[in-house]
Image (cartoon, helix red, strand yellow):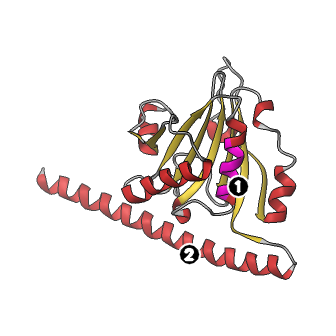
Amino acid sequence: MEIREKKEAEDKGSDTNNNQASLDQSLTEREAEDRERQARDVKAGLHPLKYKFVFWYTRRTPGVRTQTSYEENIKKIVDFSTVEGFWVCYCHLVRPSALPTPTDLHLFKEGIRPLWEDSANCNGGKWIIRFKKAVSGRFWEDLVLALVGDQLDYGDNICGAVLSVRFNEDILSVWNRNASDHQAVMALRDSIKRHLKLPHSYVMEYKPHDASLRDNSSYRNTWLRG
């Protein structure tokens, strides 16, 4: 019995190491592609961003059950890699106040899907902030600009951000790669508060994605308040 348990633990550790090695290789390849892209943009007279981003959109019909998975409901809107490209697409996006309920608008680095199970997200989590609908649009825009401009601390650890438009409130969340890196998690919280100039009355909550997978909920039973 002990031998079998030891073997299972070794196999699990091996799988974890292999997954991490694969992720590290993917990050290295993406960094090389980013450098090549930035060189092309500069040559073309454009202003390259540090990362290439993708806007995604999810819309569900209230009260209607469907066999379609959440992943299948996520639709890519547009990608961009320069300052000019960002403003071209952002100026044509519908404002949060005009989006139907419930809707999710996602802004993620290229190569990262806005899913808990994605290899870049599966070991991470998200900081959650709830807003009254009258002010959510301004805070969302400030968050988008901070993310696109690489202004938040531990930027390499950030995967993306989500605006969740709901009936009585709107919810902003910032996703990061590693929920177990307490220093990075707390530094990200402080950076978000600083760049959004959040009033002291606003409470931020953190929830690891593995907890979301267990209870099948993005925002219930949060792990940490700060």
Q: Type of residue at label 2? A: Thr
Quadrant for the C terminus in the image? top left
Q: Type of residue at label 1? A: Leu
Q: How many dots with numbers?
A: 2
- Residue found at x 72% / y 47%: 141
- The quarter holding residue 14 reads bottom left
| Number of the front mark, 2 or 1 | 1
Q: Position of residue 148 (x, y in %)?
A: 69, 59
- Residue found at x 81% / y 76%: 41
Q: Position of residue 74 (x, y in %)?
A: 69, 41
Q: In the rendered image, which residue does mark 1 sit on?
A: 145
**CA neighbours of label 2 inside 10 A, class few (<14), some (14 to 19), many (20+):** few
Main SS class of the magenta portion in the image: helix
Q: Position of residue 75 (x, y in %)?
A: 74, 44
For residue 123, side relative to residue 199 (left or right):
left
Do callouts 2 and 1 mark residues in contact (Cβ within 8 Å)?
no
Q: Which residues are magenta?
A: 139-147
